[in-house]
Amino acid sequence: MLQFKLVLLGDSSVGKSSIVHRFVKDSFDEFRESTIGAAFLSQTIKIEDKGSQQEVVIKFEIWDTAGQERYKSLAPMYYRNANAALVVYDVTQQDSLAKAQGWVNELKTKVGEDDLVICLVGNKLDLCTEEGESSSKPKAVESSDAEGYANEQGLLFHEVSAKTGEGVKQVFQSIGEKLYEFKKHELANSKGRQGAGGDTVNVQLQRPSTNDATSCCG
């Protein structure tokens, strides 16, 4: 089993926690309270090695960070040593993408780009598709603008709805596949040491999860 540390970053109220809970628990809470500091969850997925057609199990150790400005200084504690990051914005808020771009720049500056998979995620698609309903809002961030930026920066890109679940699983699936490509050589080396047998191989990566006793939620 491959184990990866994944962190969610983004402004307050873009729906980071809702995305995580949809992925981990397949649930949605319309009145979810804002995250304080950070929350930890975990979930596994399965991908297929296209070469060997063997099944690979990937476990995500997920840190969901608070988006409020007063908690921003804590973010480095959680994205340090991360293997992947979801940078989330709200498709109904025009300035939300610019704030997400700020997080991308911070990650690239302080963490670097080697083996770090960054996925830009536009959330709240459901608010733009429920035409005629009181909750319907115009789409303030065009898909082409966000996708163009993601391509320029070498990011994965998805648009999702945490409320309906649309696109959420695909986000984590694409991240898992990308991370596996990065770490495939480690998997091969581990197979050589352990020998054939079983469809999955336990590999302890060099980027452990952050379980710092000094953290706000340790």
Image (cartoon, rainbow, N blue to C red):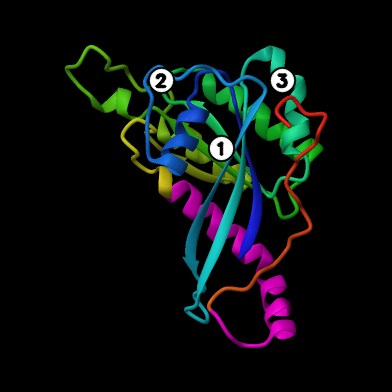
Q: Is residue 180 left or right of residue 203?
A: left
Residue bearing the label numbered 3: 72
Name the residue beneath numbered marker 2.
92
Quadrant assignment for the C terminus: top right
Measure the C-alpha gap from mark 1 to mark 3: 23 Å
- Residue farthest toward the bottom in the current orientation of the protein: 196
Q: Position of residue 178 (x, y in %)?
A: 58, 58
Q: Secondary structure at mark 3?
A: helix
Question: Reading the chain from its start, which is encountered first: label 2 or label 3?
Answer: 3
Q: In the rendered structure, which disc, 2 or 1, sits on the residue that comes first in sequence?
A: 2
| Residue 149, numbered circle | 1
Q: Nearer the viewer, residue 127 or 18?
A: 18
Which region of the structure is painted magenta? 170-198
Q: Is residue 132 above or below residue 53?
A: above
Q: Residue at x 65, y 53 (%)?
A: 4
Q: Quadrant of the N terminus?
A: bottom right
